[in-house]
Structures are given as structure tokens and as C-alpha cells.
Amino acid sequence: MPSVKDVVVRKPSEEEAEECKSWPTWECGPSEFDWAYTQTETCLILEGQVTVTDGESEVSFGPGDMVVFPVDLECKWKVRKPVRKHYKFD
């Protein structure tokens, strides 16, 4: 079972950032919720601040970060500032 330590947070290349513009967007206000990934998700954070935890570790990300969540990850999202992101599932 993957953990939050398996989440990849990095800055995208110019080409990756351009490609993300064609992906759907998702928005969420400050909140906390459980989430389980049934597919790999790649997203580009446009606005906001989020911390994701699996109960043992946590990772935070914000504007300009490209984040890859592995399939089968079970975690809690803590949206600290309203988030807007482009996303795709593989």
C-alpha cells in the first residue's frame, strides 16, 4: 500500500505546464476530507495550499507544484487555502 511518502511534488517543465492547460479543473474551499485513489492522478496546482496526510506522514503543496498521487493511496486532504488545479487520471 503506498503512503504519502510516495507522492511526488515537483515543478513542471514549460511543456508539462502547457499540456496541463488542456486538462479539466477542480476547485475546493478550505476543508478536510478522506480520499482513496483508484487511479494515478497528476495535477498542477494553480492556487491554494494543501496538506495531505496518511496518518503517519504528510506532504504540502501549493501554486506551481505538479503533484502525482499513486494508485491505491488512502489519505486525508487538508485544504488550508482555496485550491484550484488542473488534473488528469491515468
Image (cartoon, helix red, strand yellow):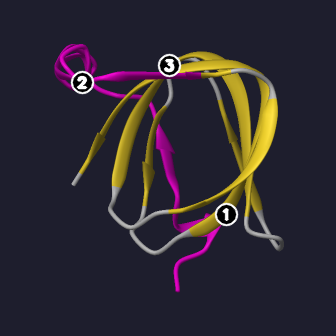
Of callouts 2 and 1, which one flags the residue occurring earlier in the amino acid sequence? Answer: 2
Let me know if residue 21 is in the magenta part.
Answer: yes
> Residue type at mark 2?
Trp
Asked where in the image residue 56 lies, by quadrant, the reply is bottom right
Q: Is residue 58 left or right of residue 83?
A: right
Give the label on residue 23, or none. Answer: 2
Give the magenta-colored segment's residue range: 1-27
Q: Nearer the viewer, mark 3 or mark 2?
A: 2
Q: Is residue 35 left or right of residue 88?
A: right
Q: Is residue 86 left or right of residue 62?
A: left
58 shown above or below 83 = below
CA separation in Å, label 3 and label 2: 15 Å
Q: Which residue is mark 1?
A: 75
Q: Residue at x 24, y 24 (%)?
A: 23
Let me know if residue 71 is in the magenta part.
Answer: no
Q: Which residue is mark 3?
A: 64
SS state under label 3: loop
Task: Mark 3: give few (<14), some (14-19) or many (20+) Cα within 10 Å.
Answer: some
- x, y percent for residue 10: 46, 38
Of callouts 3 and 2, which one flags the residue occurring earlier in the amino acid sequence? Answer: 2
> Residue type at mark 3?
Gly
Task: Give the farthest residue toward the bottom.
Answer: 1
> Residue type at mark 1?
Cys
Residues at discs 3 and 2 in contact (Cβ within 8 Å):
no
Question: 87 or 44, which lies in front?
Answer: 87
76 shown above or below 14 = below
Residues at discs 3 and 1 in contact (Cβ within 8 Å):
no
Q: Residue at x 76, y 57 (%)?
A: 58
CA separation in Å, label 3 and label 1: 22 Å
Q: Residue at x 20, y 14 (%)?
A: 18
